[in-house]
Amino acid sequence: MTTILHTESSPGWGGQEMRVHLELIGLRERGHRMLLACHPESELAKRAERAGLEVWCLVSETHRSQTDLADAPPPDAGTGGAGEHT
């Protein structure tokens, strides 16, 4: 199984975010572990969580209370899915 990290900084929902969402789901269906790092309040984060994808919130100096991607477990840690890391 290959682990793929997809990053998206946009908080909006449009063509770019729709493409990312479809790619995440499609690649997961092909057996890959998909990780998404994105804006914590984005529509993409909400939809990805509802789809059962592993979501990590990007942080900035003004959002230090959010999960820091540096705290992510290694790919072989066997982490599950939505909600565990947000």
Image: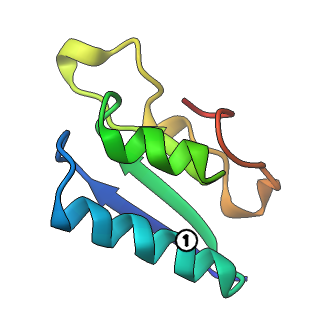
Residue in view at x 60 percent, y 34 percent: 85
Residue appearing at x 28%, y 16% in the figure? 63
Whether residue 32 is visible: no
28 vs 36: above or below: below
Q: Nearer the viewer, residue 28 or 66?
A: 28
Identity of the residue furthest to the bottom in this view: 30
Residue under the image location 43 percent in, 72 percent down: 22
- Residue 70 can be seen in this image: yes
Q: Quadrant of residue 14?
A: bottom left
Q: Position of residue 50 (x, y in %)?
A: 59, 44
State the residue position of label 1: 25
- Image coordinates of residue 73 in percent, x first then y, are 66, 46
In which quadrant of the rendered image does the C terminus lie?
top right
Residues packed near mark 1 inside 10 Å, few (<14), some (14 to 19) or many (20 plus): some
Q: Nearer the viewer, residue 13 or 86?
A: 13
> Residue 49, percent across and down?
56, 43
Q: Secondary structure at mark 1?
A: helix
Q: Quadrant of the N terminus?
A: bottom right
The answer to whether residue 41 is above or below residue 54 is: above
Q: In the rendered view, would you say 63 is above or below 2?
A: above
What colour scheme does the image use? Answer: rainbow
Image side of residue 3 versus residue 59, left or right: right
In the visual, does 77 lie left or right of 46? Answer: right
Q: Residue 63, relative to residue 53: is it above or below?
A: above
User: Is residue 16 toward the left or the right of residue 63 in the image?
Assistant: left
Q: Is residue 48 left or right of residue 63?
A: right
Q: Amino acid at mark 1?
A: Ile
Q: Position of residue 71 (x, y in %)?
A: 55, 35
Q: Nearer the viewer, residue 34 or 45?
A: 45
* In the image, farthest residue toward the right: 78
